[in-house]
Amino acid sequence: MNAERLLLHYERIADTPDAIARLRRFILDLAVRGKLVPQDASDEPASDLLKRIAKEKARLAKAGDIRKPPTLEPITDAEALYVLPRTWAWVRVGDIFDYDAGTKRDPKELDQSRWLLELEDIEKDTSRIIERLRVSDRDSQSTKSEFEPGDILYGKLRPYLNKVVVADEPGYSTTEIVAIRPLLRLCPEYCALAFRRPDFVAYVERLGRGTKMPRLRTPDAIVAPFPLPPLAEQRRIVAKVDQLMGLCDRLEAARAGREAVRDRLTAASLARLNAPNPETFEADARFALDALPALTTRPDQIKRLRQTILNLAVRGKLVPQDAGDEPASELLKRIAKEIAAYGKANRIGQAQADPISDDDLAFAAPSSWEWARLSALFKVITDGDHQPPPKADKGVAFLTIGNVTTGRLDFTGCRLVPEAYFKSLAPYRTPAKGDILYTVVGATYGRPALVETDRAFCVQRHIAILKPVEAMSVRFLMALLASPLVYDQATRSTTGTAQPTIALRPLRNFLAPIPPLAEQYRIVAKVDVLMALCDRLEASLTANAATRRRLLDALLAEALAPAGERELEAAE
């Protein structure tokens, strides 16, 4: 394989999120199929190697050095997952290995100076040893498995199935790491990579037993198919795999470097917008919006851009103020009258809002704006019934927090409650079109969703119901509730650790900067334009990712093909 040629072409698709991981898997796949290095006719074939292994297996069993091995049926054509070179052979793991060969040791028997290996010490995908600790470094309270140099140490617990290392010194491991000992001297590094190959991982995932932490059972392990090359070819394969994995390391480092530069540039651009200089803001905003499409390669970067847009919107930095607008102070007077009238009509006592001091304010709002508590912007802020509702096969939809966490109402598979129960609820505790729902419990707290349906439904107590006043722009309120300003207040107000909860009283007292009504509409129009840009960036990312994946498939198939095949294709 021409590593330099691969490096040259691979840059075209190196930003595909799983590109390096797929390349590593592809290398392993080709390695165990005999497609990574050419075969040598002078190599001792695997069939002769197997005869020598069988003799050694019989000798070890007779001497009592290994358990009496079970009789295993030969691999059938149906079990052979792919065609191997003629000098190779499909065998069962139990034919050539003593599976789970490690002697089980009580914690008190352990040599304090020896290596003690745990699953977390092995890096996923690469199987590198991250940390090498001794027995004396750990508090060992459970039985351990003793291993010898040359053993293949296999993590049999899902999701650690690609954690496989070769022991280079004696030691112990957790019993979830199995010592697999070749019955005759093989190339242990080849054996280790063969146990990491994609089809073996798939085999174990399919047969893994257990519910919480599935693991490979010994009876399933010893009958698993194993592709065995000649011994000399095993060493050539390992050398080539080492070379290509080194190439993967360089590609990974190069990509990490590019991502770090992009992250710094993106962060710097967004920081200048989030803490704007009035004199340079317009130029900074223009630069950011021009540059971010080129810098944005991941969904999390677009998410930060969306949050920046909302942050600017609620700070009065997204559109210019107009001296001709009616100030927010007048707007709030009309809102107060509307809230009072609604409360009187529905016999709702008006919640007492906390006073606002200058120390409470997160920033200085434009002069035409006003600060207010959320309770001063909504006719009512309440939540669903605190008692579990009765269930029904037919009736009215009952939405739980999972039905609104995407920012849209999802009635798919929702529960139903009797219509009589729904009618028993106070009207102000049932959502209506134009209301805003807000999640107040769990990991997905602080997410607003606009009710855009006329369908009757009710909600659980984990969802707050905010009924906007007519005098405010509902879409501005949505932007406000989705902004970092409100989310930060939500985070500070949560109680509980396992199940964070925002109570209604702190929610009603969240602080909100209120622009004049005319400016609210200008802000919403600008937010729409910029969010549409974010939508296009996300669509572009998705399309580019699909294109890169197709290019990756083609590139790997071409670049990793053995040289002889490439020359043959060129000749044809």
Image: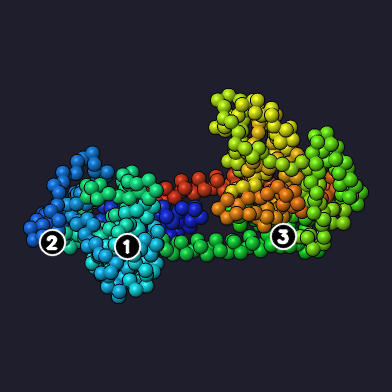
Q: Give the percent coordinates (x, y) of residue 484.
A: 69, 54
**Residue 222 x/y as whole percent:** 22, 50
Q: Is residue 123 above or below residue 159?
A: below
Q: Is residue 37 left or right of residue 376?
A: left
Residue 49 visible in the displayed image:
no
Point out which mark residue 477 bears: none
> Depth-wise, is mark 3 or mark 2 nearer the camera?
2
Q: How is the image coloured?
A: rainbow
The mark found on residue 274 in the picture is: 3
How packed mark 1 is, by other alpha carbons closer than 10 Å (few <14, some 14-19, many 20 or more), is few
Residue picked out by circle 1: 142
Closer-to-camera residue (275/3)? 275
What residue sits 58% from the left and 64% below the top?
A: 261
N-term-proximal mark, 3 vs 1: 1
In the picture, measured across the screen, residue 412 lies left or right of residue 229, that is right
Pick the front one: 560 or 162: 162
* Residue type highlighted by circle 3: Asn
**Residue at 37%, 70% in the rendered image:** 138
Q: Residues within 10 Å of mark 3 (few under 14, many from 20)?
A: some
Tell me residue 412's x, y (percent).
56, 32
Q: What is the C-alpha distance between the residues marked 3 and 1?
A: 53 Å
Q: Residue furthest bottom?
A: 113
| Residue type at tag 2 | Asp
Mark 3 vs 2, N-terminal side:
2
Instruction: Name the mark on residue 65.
Output: 2
Q: Secondary structure at mark 2?
A: loop
Q: Quadrant of the C terminus?
A: top left
Q: Residues within 10 Å of mark 2 (few under 14, many from 20)?
A: few
Alpha carbon separation for disc pair 3 and 2: 70 Å
From the viewer's side, name the closer residue of 217 and 140.
140
Q: Residue furthest right?
A: 324
